[in-house]
């Protein structure tokens, strides 16, 4: 584990299978309550399945990264994460040819970066349960998460993975329940600007979003996105249906690597 200052914040990061080549690196972006540690052994599994180095990091307020104040963040908080913090982090860590793999909030941030035109441009984007707009089911589940956090052992479980668990939880939860966020969060325009391959993965029983998220990504990407709807799977495909998720990740990487030389020479 190491630390880097990106976007003006001290962030933790970790490499799995870091090599000396100039080849592509997979960069994993965690969910709204995730961190480096909460990925558990999935980065190792991605490295084994693809043969590519994998970079994981904790965003501001998560894991062992710099702490964040409790309470709501700006409604557009994911935009600077994708357009400013992520490219700064990639540049400082020497990642010139990223393939982004994001879960939930991390998937949304990956889409924002890919549509931003800010270097380093990703060779491909894989999302798991990403949101491009807010649905009623999302708001209901996030409200339930607050009840669970305050009345069950959820807080104690999350505290094992975050230095400041209350900052991590409330900065996410309070923002998603803001009326302005519910009405205003929409990154479909970002998706329309993406030119690299996209694979959008979602569980058929995702409690935070419906198939409308996949439909939007398919439509806004002009049909360039591969859509993967996994049965018997909830909000975390990499935990609920690991084999199917890894197969989709491997397929995406193979597609990117096959097209990368042509892109580089164009």
Image (tube, rainbow, N blue to C red):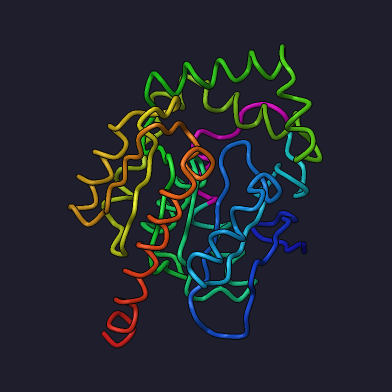
Q: The N terminus appears in which quarter of the rendering? A: bottom right
* 21 left or right of 123 in image: right
Examine the rendered structure and indicate whether residue 89 appears above or below residue 244: below
Instruction: Name which residue lies at 73% across and 32% down.
Output: 158
* Image location (x, y in percent) of residue 60: 68, 47
Determine whether, in the image, residue 22 is placed left or right of residue 111: right
Q: Which residues are magenta?
A: 70-81
Quarter the C terminus occupies: bottom left
Can you say whether 169 is above or below 56 in the image? Answer: above
163 sits to left or right of 19: right
Name which residue lies at 72% across and 55% down: 11
**Residue 75 lies within the magenta run:** yes
Side of 120 relative to 14 (left or right)? left
- Magenta residue check for 83: no
Q: Please name whichever residue, 169 or 174, is drawn nearer the observer in this view of the structure.
A: 169
**Horizontal and vertical percent for residue 156?**
78, 26
Q: Residue 130's quadrant in the figure? A: top left
Q: Residue at x 70, y 60 (%)?
A: 13
Q: Position of residue 41 (x, y in %)?
A: 65, 53
The percent coordinates of residue 212 (x first, y second) are: 28, 32
């Amino acid at each position: 584990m190491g630390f880097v200052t990106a976007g003006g914040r001290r962030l933790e990061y970790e490499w799995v299978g870091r090599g000396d080549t100039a080849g592509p690196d997979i960069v994993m972006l965690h969910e709204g309550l995730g961190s480096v540690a909460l990925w558990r052994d999935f980065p190792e599994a991605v490295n084994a399945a693809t043969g590519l180095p994998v970079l994981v990091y904790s965003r501001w307020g998560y894991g062992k990264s710099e702490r964040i104040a409790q309470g709501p963040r700006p409604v557009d908080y994911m935009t600077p994460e994708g357009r400013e913090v992520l490219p700064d982090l990639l540049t400082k860590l020497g990642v010139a040819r990223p393939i982004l793999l994001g879960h939930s909030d991390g998937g949304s941030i990956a889409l924002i970066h890919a549509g931003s035109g800010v270097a380093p441009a990703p060779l491909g984007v894989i999302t798991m349960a990403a949101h491009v707009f807010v649905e009623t089911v999302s708001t209901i589940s996030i409200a339930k998460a607050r009840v669970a956090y305050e009345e069950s052992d959820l807080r104690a479980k999350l505290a094992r993975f975050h230095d400041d668990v209350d900052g991590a939880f409330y900065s996410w939860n309070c923002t998603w329940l803001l009326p302005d966020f519910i009405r205003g969060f929409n990154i479909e325009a970002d998706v329309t600007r993406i030119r690299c391959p996209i694979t959008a993965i979602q569980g058929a029983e995702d409690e935070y979003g419906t198939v409308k998220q996949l439909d939007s990504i398919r439509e806004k990407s002009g049909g360039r996105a591969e859509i993967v709807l996994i049965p018997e799977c909830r909000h975390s495909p990499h935990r609920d249906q690991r084999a199917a998720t890894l197969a989709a990740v491997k397929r995406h990487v193979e597609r990117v690597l096959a097209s990368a030389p042509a892109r580089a020479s164009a």
